[in-house]
Amino acid sequence: MAHIAVLGAGYVGLTTAACFSHLGHTVVCGDVLADRVDQLSRGEVPIREAGLEELVRTGLDGGHLSFVVGEQAAAAECEFCYLCVPTPQAPDGSADLSFIRQAASAVGSMLPPESVVVNKSTVPVGSTRVVEQALGRDDVKVASNPEFLREGSAVHDFLHPDRIVIGCEDQATAGRVAALFEGIQAPVIVTDPASAETIKYASNAFLATKVSFVNAIANVCEAVGADVREVVLGMGYDRRIGFEFLKPGPGWGGSCFPKDTRALIRIAEDAGYDFDLLKGVVAVNDAQFEKVVTKVEALAGGSVAEQVIAVWGLTFKARTDDLRGSPSLEIISRLQARGARIRAYDPAVTDAVDGLEVAADPYAACEGASVLLVLTEWDEFRWLDFEKVGGLMAERRMVDARNLLDPAAVRRRGFAYDAIGRS
């Protein structure tokens, strides 16, 4: 069992720290926010993620996990130092590496000899060199170990991954990093750092491409009178295609896809390649946001100005409380720009949201609304009393941007109903 430092107690860092402690390693997780450290030290997890709070409390109780303020306090005696700090998007689409440089510089002088610094953050190709320069140490190795965590199932994804990717020029060091995952049954891919870093971006870009493709196909289905559900069913049984990420909706978002697609476009441009295909994927996604807005306007009689639009769902997907890059917020913003008054409900959002009226329950969101817009696929929306919903609304009109509900059942209750790719 190893002594691991994790720098950053955000989404990736906290999941990494908790899961490594679950595997039996001694983990010290450092963060610059003292309030967050205090909260985590009490076993209180500030994010919604299945199984994470249980792992944190078990790690604390068993002495395998602790939280401290600052990078240096975490890294003083570590064998492995995981960098899990933010890499926000710069205005030109590139990833901002200032937090990576700062964290590496902070611990460079105090890391024990022969320790290994591991990039877990999503970073551009060549970032291992950036970390090596920031460390300023010849006796400390640097490796890449990109994360493939889906929000809502991050703990499961860490402990039951499709693959473990390790990028390092030194094979012995790569073997040491691989040994940290002993007990996890998954293929281990050991490659060079540039390839490991590219695997992360390429994976997210491909998944975003699948979503944009099925949204485009949904638009074709509407035009020709086909049902996208039947089309996807026929496609998905082809093992070369599969069913994953072939669910039409309001467009993709979240903390990774928007940032990573634009970053890969910029990486390609810097290397002299015009990634026109991926630019098209981004353009299709932007058009999908507008497509949903147009559907709402059409049901509202051509304009949403001065009308109340009820929205169910604010998070970028169900089973998370993450609002970062949410398609819901983008679509809401576009509706507000056209003069709509939005009243929204989300089961995971209890705090105020700037510029938005957040209702206490899904029924309250519908009071006096001209159109109900479903934007996040929370299961609880399926089982509501739609007769009551219709009675609260000014007009029984609904745009189901997640194809969540049964059109026939909703129409039987007098709703004018529109969805994505369904005639």
Image (cartoon, rainbow, N blue to C red):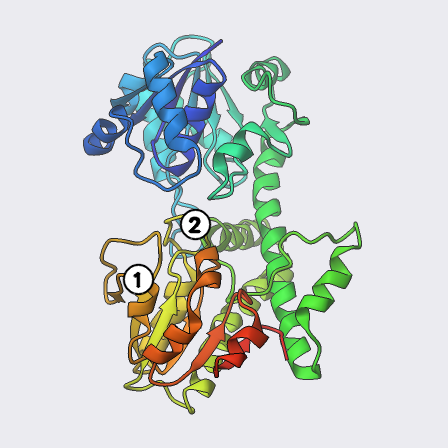
User: Residue 37 location, x and y as percent?
Assistant: 24, 28
Which residue occupies 59% across, 16% down?
Answer: 182
**Label 2: which residue?**
255
Which residue occupies 63% across, 35% down?
Answer: 195
Q: Amino acid at mark 1?
A: Asp
**Label 1: which residue?**
361
User: Residue 393 location, x and y as percent?
Assistant: 34, 80
User: Residue 196 location, x and y as percent?
Assistant: 60, 34
Mark 2 falls on what kind of element? loop
- Tell me the CA gap for discs 2 and 1: 26 Å
Pick the front one: 412 or 214: 412
Left of 201 or right of it: where is 253?
Answer: left
Task: Find residue 17 and report its image quarter.
Answer: top left
Nearer the viewer's eye, disc 2 or disc 1? 1
Q: Amino acid at mark 2?
A: Ser
Few, some or many residues within 10 Å of mark 2 (<14, 14–19, 20+) = some
User: Residue 281 location, x and y as percent?
Assistant: 59, 63
